[in-house]
Amino acid sequence: MIAKNKCTWLAAILLISASVERLQAQDYYSDAFGDSDLQFFSPVDFDFEDRPMRKSGGFIFNYDKLAWAFTGERHALGAGGTSTASMNPWRQFDSGGTLIPDPANDGEFLLLPGTTIPIPAPALPTAINNSAPRAEFGWGDRYELGYWEGDNGWLVGILDGPEAVSAQSLGFGRVGVDGTTGGIVTPENPNGLLLSPLGSVLIVFDDPLNLMLGFLDVVDGLVVGGSPGGALEADSNGDGILDGDGLADDIDKDGQHGPDGFVSDTAFIPDVDFVTANPDFDDLVQLPTSFQSVDIRNTSEMKGVEIMRTHRLSNRHKMAKRQGNQYELSYGVRYLRLRDQFVVNGSGGVLGRSFWDTQVMNNVVGPQIGLKWMHQRRRMRLDWGGRFLFGYNAANLSQTAALGQDLVPGQLNKPLYFPPTYANHGKLEKEFSPVIEVRLQTSFQVTGAIALKLGYTATFIDNIRRASQQVKYELPNMGFRDGAGTQDIFINGVNFGFDVVY
């Protein structure tokens, strides 16, 4: 009987000892509900060092929502030089002349010529020196799927975006594709804005063939309003464009108005007769390459995929209190695609409806190495890692350009020799484009299998090509600028998401 009681007490003591040992392995915040490795929402188990007990093997899935910004490439819109076209078409004016009533008795006056003083046409630089692209944020997604077996694993990462868009609108007036106007004087909108026939947005183009020569119709010596103080300009046909009298301006003051014939007598005698004659090419001026309104849109997008082999370096040789720090070394391959698109749409002015769409597809591929440091403290973990990609970049450039879609050669205030021109260009450039990526994030262990995370990612890519820097502003076909070289880009922003272990 005594031996039986002793055996009973001994069994009870062993059972209590095992229970106490199990309870000591639990943290104040954890529950002792058995093995929870395959339960997504099981509580977190902690070891003696107050660290969550995580699985050493199995599948993992990471998701991040990205909010990243792309650095801009603000630049001067145009050829970068100056235009010899005259934005002040009155290259000469009359001094000491006499104002007389118009013989037509229409309430206007004529200015008798006096001394003619020539004024050289000024060379004007492009005024758009702060063009897009600008630094803008875009949204994207990052997915990572991997498998761990002990201290070794595989990881496949997919980057979908982000896409950043920057836009800019320039000019005083806007003319729609269908010919409608907004804010411009029309019979239906008499209080709108009168626009210059030459436009308000000057974009300097190189014109080696002198295609921008044309006849002006801005002013022809008429004083509108019945007094010397009246305006020298008018909207002759009610289209909201501030032009002259419907005749080409007599720039050289010889009585012949450009292509409109030669006057047989002076312009100040009633009932003058016109005779057929060759155009007066002395009335030609070099027109500016300008628009009433310009819309600019730049889109930058990054996508990619990587396959990495990862090794977790052992820390078992360290003291137990130091085993909260771990290191991972990884190596593999990565493909990164950076698409940069630069689109400009112009309307109105001298060149009329035009656009050029330039796109560069930077395809960067190569071997990649990575190193990550992790520090675990209770439910929180801090990760700090970096990757370096030895990138080979095959940059595919393409451009579609259409200038002067609504031009009719010979129109007043339009180029005489420049017809509507459509062009398409493409080329391939190859570069060494190294990529450096740094990730810093913190995660919070919610359950035994799920952790929420918040982090920061910064990526620097060298020797890529930005679309806005490749445009060649030359009439009539545009194309890619010689010696444009390469640029770099810095992409950074926050990411937030979750990790799942199964």
Image (tube, rainbow, N blue to C red):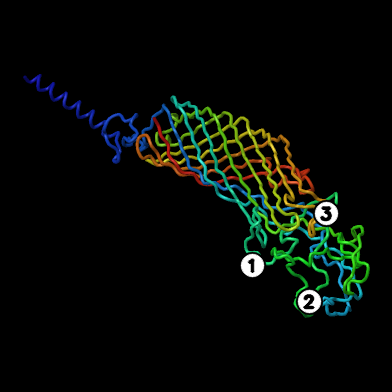
- 1 and 2 marks in contact (CB < 8 Å): no
Q: Which residue bears the numbered disc 2?
A: 106
* Residue under numbered circle 3: 416
Would you name the residue on which mark 1 appears? Answer: 192
38 relative position to 274: left or right: left
Considering only order in the chain, which callout, 2 or 3, is on the residue closer to the N terminus? Answer: 2
Q: Position of residue 270 (x, y in %)?
A: 88, 74
- Where, by quadrant of the figure, is residue 319 drawn? top left
Residue placed at 40% from the left, 36% from the top?
321
Pick the front one: 293 or 134: 293
Q: CA–CA distance between discs 1 and 2?
A: 26 Å
- Distance CA(mark 3)–CA(mark 1): 30 Å
- What amino acid type is highlighted by mark number 3? Leu
For marks 3 and 1 on the same chain, the one whose residue lies earlier in the sequence:
1
Is disc 3 in contact with disc 1, using a CB cutoff of under 8 Å?
no
Q: Nearer the viewer, residue 402 or 250?
A: 250
| Helix, strand or loop under label 2 | loop
- Residue 256 vertical position relative to residue 76 in the rendered view, above or below: below
On the image, the x and y values in percent for residue 129 come to: 71, 57
Residue 328 horizontal side relative to residue 260, left or right? left
- SS of the residue under disc 1: loop
Q: Could you tell me which quadrant the C terminus lies in?
A: top left
User: 214 or 121: which is nearer to us?
Assistant: 214
Secondary element type, mark 3 = loop
Distance from the alpha carbon under mark 3 to that under mark 2: 32 Å
Q: Using a 10 Å C-alpha cutoff, classify the residue at mark 3 as few (fewer than 14 neighbours), some (14 to 19) or many (20 or more).
A: many
